[in-house]
Image (tube, rainbow, N blue to C red):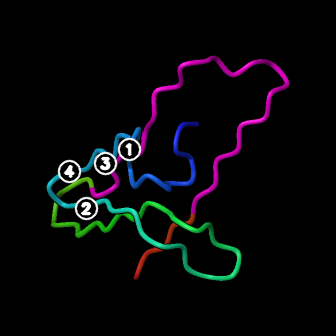
Amino acid sequence: AYNGGFSQEAQGWNTATNDLATASVVAGEGADAPARAVRYVVTPAADTKPWNVRLAQVMHQPIRKGQALTLSFRARSPE
């Protein structure tokens, strides 16, 4: 992945959000956290789809059989 560690902010990434969400690159938090990460802050309103956000990147080479692809994320909710 291009800029997989977000050292160049969100360059190369599509941080699609809706009117209820913001996305920003922040410093990692915690001993096992990466140096930088993307943080989405979603403020849902009644009768909305607050989960309708996306972090995407165009892959210019196919993933081949047996090749490893690692995706990690953390999610939390105040509820």
Relative vertical location of residue 8 with respect to residue 56 in this rendering, above or below: below
User: For the residue carrying disc 1, how many other residues have a C-alpha within 10 Å: few (<14), some (14-19), or many (20+)?
Assistant: few
Circle 2 or circle 4, nearest the eye: 2
On the image, numbered disc 2 is attached to which residue? Answer: 22
Considering only order in the chain, which callout, 2 or 3, is on the residue closer to the N terminus? 2
Considering only order in the chain, which callout, 1 or 2, is on the residue closer to the N terminus? 1
Could you tell me which quadrant the C terminus lies in?
A: bottom left
User: For the residue carrying disc 4, how many other residues have a C-alpha within 10 Å: few (<14), some (14-19), or many (20+)?
Assistant: few
Residue 73 is labelled as: none
On the image, numbered disc 1 is attached to which residue? Answer: 11
Question: Outermost residue, front direction?
Answer: 8
Residue type at the position of mark 4: Asn
Residue located at (53% from left, 25% from top): 59
Asked if the residues shown at circle 3 and circle 4 are in contact, with their CB atoms under 8 angstroms apart, the answer is: yes
Numbered disc 4: secondary structure: loop
On the image, numbered disc 4 is attached to which residue? Answer: 18
Q: Magenta stretch mostly in which secondary structure?
A: loop
Relative vertical location of residue 61 with respect to residue 76 in this rendering, above or below: above
Residue type at the position of mark 1: Gln
Considering only order in the chain, which callout, 4 or 3, is on the residue closer to the N terminus? 4
User: For the residue carrying disc 2, how many other residues have a C-alpha within 10 Å: few (<14), some (14-19), or many (20+)?
Assistant: some
Would you say residue 24 sits in the magenta stretch? no
- Tell me which segment is drawn in magenta: 50-73
Residue located at (22% from left, 66% from top): 44
Residue located at (25% from left, 50% from top): 17
